[in-house]
Image (cartoon, rainbow, N blue to C red):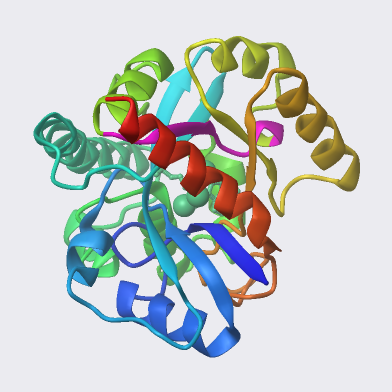
Amino acid sequence: MIADLHIHTTASDGCLTAQEVLAASERLGLRMIAITDHDTVDAHVALQKQPYTKGLTTVIPGIEFSTDVLHSEVHILGYHIDIKHDELNTNLTHIMNDRINRARKIVDKLSHLGYPISFQRVREIAGDAQSIGRPHIAKALVEQGFFSSVGQVFHSLLKKNGPAYFPHYKLTPLEVSGLIHRAGGLAVLAHPGLIGDDSLARHILTLGLDGIEAIHPAHSTKQIGYYHKMAISQGLLVTGGSDFHGVSGRFPEKLGEFTIPIILANKINEAAALQRSMK
Ligand code: AMP
Ligand code: FE
Ligand code: FE
Ligand code: ZN
């Protein structure tokens, strides 16, 4: 029995709508999924009252927060959050507005660097997504023929501290972890291998985090073992997921190609229930 605890939709930079993710998960026999869009719970709002069957028992309300720490980007996943939580939603509104301003700044900077694209086109590419991100901008640059792939755009311009990089809304990992907990959820350090600095990852884990996403497609087998051990030695949960975006050329291209054992998802659910019962 399989699960996937890290899935993006068109509410952020994924290519499938929340309903399409649900239908594909049912068809593929996924037992439990978590939709974890960047800085938004819009997919979960869209799925309210949407029935699911065929073996899919749980859609965990999740989110993935982006923070900037020193030379790294640090992503923190929230699981079993109350999507109607006031403080959470107030923060998400600020982050969403800031993402729009950030995208405008990036588009302006790109124009100065000799890559003119219109903000209007970026918004069109983002579609329903209120959570505008660099992948939407990168797609506009590829469409204009400046680059042949989104990956190339990141490499040349948009990666952290690249020529057209602008930081995220200023929320620290400590603030994110507190916010997730107050919204009733569990906070998990996303893809620590992508932080590129294990001492920073270890430090962030001390800020009240509940788990480590050891299993991620960007991690080598050695890294999975390393972060798994790190979690166990600190009494933290081990989680994992595909980080599915549905983008061609980015593994996994299809849901169900990268999954985790259901037992890990069950442990998240048990820990979240325990936390709620003690409030
Ligand atoms: P943002 O939300 O603006 O910080 O953009 C972050 C998102 O960009 C990540 O979550 C990935 O989905 C995507 N991303 C980051 N690096 C790359 C890359 N090298 N190639 C393609 N997509 C990337
Ligand atoms: Fe993404
Ligand atoms: Fe991430
Ligand atoms: Zn992600």
Q: Where 172 falls versus 263 (above or below)?
A: above
In this orientation, which residue lies closer to the viewer: 69 or 165?
69
Residue at the spot 61% in from the left edge and 55% down from the top edge: 241
Whether residue 164 is visible to the viewer of this picture, yes or no, is no
Which of these two is toward me, 117 or 238? 238
Q: Residue at x 32, y 16 (%)?
A: 175
Q: Residue 49 colored magenta?
A: no
With 223 as the anchor, is 205 left or right in this view? Answer: left
170 shown above or below 276: above
Quadrant holding the N terminus: bottom right
Q: List x then y, in percent, for residue 219.
A: 77, 45
**x, y percent for residue 272:** 42, 39
Name the foreground residue: 171 vs 133: 171
Residue 193, position in %: x, y? 71, 34
Magenta segment boundaries in residue numbering: 184-193
What residue is drawn where x is 33% and y is 67%? 10
